[in-house]
Image: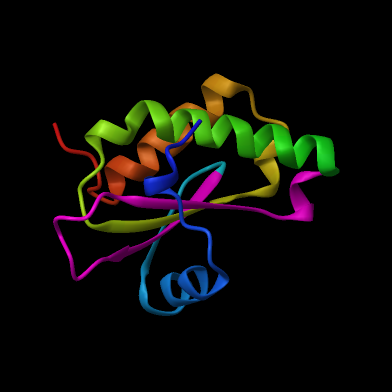
Amino acid sequence: MLPAENRLRHNRAFERIYREGSTVGEQHVVLHVLASADQASPALVGFAVSRKVGNAVARNRVRRRLREIVRTELRRLRAGEQIVVAARASAGRATFVQLAASLRRALSKAGLLNG
């Protein structure tokens, strides 16, 4: 489970990141990234999984997988970043390994990983 101090939860925060942030796309995910003014704060991550992914069971499976992948990469994420991980429709058909590879490539492309 992703720690509460690393979760984006408020709709206002999502909207701000969509409006002001930059976007990085990969096969199964799209990252919306906004650097926070406070670089000492931990990275904040939110998840957006639309109905295009599939029914409720498929959406929840994708969301759980994305949360687990981000949890494993949390120590490597740059501090002070606000990230929304949006699943593409293809994420519902992807295996865990494919989803993980896609998300890690997107994080790398966006320059969000330390080391």
**How did the renderer colour the structure?**
rainbow
Along the viewing direction, whichever of 75 and 5 lies nearer the viewer: 5
Horizontally, residue 111 falls left or right of residue 104, namely: left
Residue lying farthest right? 55
- Placement of the C terminus among the 4 image quadrants: top left
Q: Is residue 97 magenta?
A: no
Q: Which residue is painted at 53% across and 42% down in the image? A: 27
Q: Does the magenta stretch include residue 43?
A: yes
Q: Which residue is painted at 74% across and 42% down in the image? A: 59
Along the viewing direction, whichever of 75 and 59 lies nearer the viewer: 75
| Residue 92 image point, x, y percent | 72, 36
Q: In this view, does 72 lie above or below 29?
A: above
| Residue 74 image point, x, y percent | 32, 35
Q: Could you tell me how many numbered marks the image carries?
A: 0
Where, by quadrant of the figure, is residue 38 drawn? Answer: bottom left
Where, by quadrant of the figure, is residue 11 drawn? Answer: bottom right
Along the viewing direction, whichever of 72 and 19 lies nearer the viewer: 72
| Residue 50 image point, x, y percent | 72, 55
Q: In this view, does 33 lie above or below 74?
A: below
Q: Which residue is painted at 36% across and 71% down in the image? A: 21
Q: Which residue is painted at 19% across and 71% down in the image? A: 37
Give the magenta range: 29-54
| Residue 20 image point, x, y percent | 37, 78
Horizontally, residue 44 falls left or right of residue 81, namely: right
